[in-house]
Image: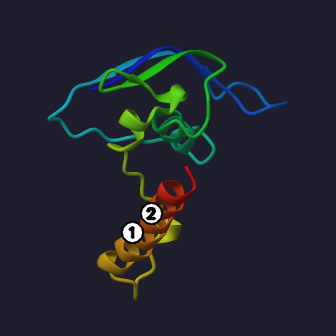
């Protein structure tokens, strides 16, 4: 479930993209996000993923505050950006490249900490 409560966000020196946004998205449903270029669709998804932080309000995903970016939240998060995927690149190759990075990161932390 995704719950936005009084969420406001805007990039510095620009007008707010959205303010006091309230939204509840229930699990088990399919939702669409439509709007003009620059309307804030990607920015809203970045708020939900915890990649940018609201100026006001809170965004909860499955009970986690997205802005806190806790490991318990991040381990359940999958965000695909269209420019990451090329037509000739298979999805498994994409995962394999990320997996090697994650394995190296785990090895680094287990040795150094």
Give the residue pinned by disc 1: 99
Outermost residue, bottom side: 88
Q: Position of residue 78 (x, y in %)?
A: 37, 51
Q: Residue at x 50, y 69 (%)?
A: 84
Q: In 3D space, how far apart are the residues under numbered discs 2 and 1 (Cα atoms)? A: 5 Å
Circles 2 and 1: CB atoms closer than 8 Å: yes
- For the N terminus, give its image quadrant: top left
Few, some or many C-alpha atoms within 10 Å of disc 2 (few <14, some 14-19, many ≥20)? few
Image height check: is 71 above or below 59?
A: below
The residue lying toward the viewer, choosing from 75 and 27, is 75
Q: Position of residue 26 (x, y in %)?
A: 22, 26
Image height check: is 51 above or below 88?
A: above
SS at badge 2: helix
Q: Residue at x 53, y 45 (%)?
A: 42
Give the residue pinned by disc 2: 102
SS at badge 1: helix
The residue lying toward the viewer, choosing from 58 and 34, is 58
Few, some or many C-alpha atoms within 10 Å of disc 1 (few <14, some 14-19, many ≥20)? few
* 19 horizontally vs 3: left or right: right
The residue lying toward the viewer, choosing from 12 and 58, is 58
């Amino acid at each position: 479930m995704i719950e936005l409560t009084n969420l406001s966000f805007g990039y510095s020196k620009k007008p707010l993209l959205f303010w006091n946004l309230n939204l509840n998205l229930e699990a088990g449903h399919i939702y669409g996000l439509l709007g003009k270029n620059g309307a804030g669709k990607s920015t809203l998804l970045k708020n939900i993923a915890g990649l940018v932080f609201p100026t006001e309000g809170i965004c909860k995903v499955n009970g986690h505050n997205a802005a806190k970016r806790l490991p318990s939240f991040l381990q359940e998060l999958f965000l695909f950006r269209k420019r990451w995927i090329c037509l000739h690149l298979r999805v498994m190759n994409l995962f394999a490249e990320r997996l090697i990075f994650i394995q190296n990161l785990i090895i680094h932390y287990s040795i150094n900490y």
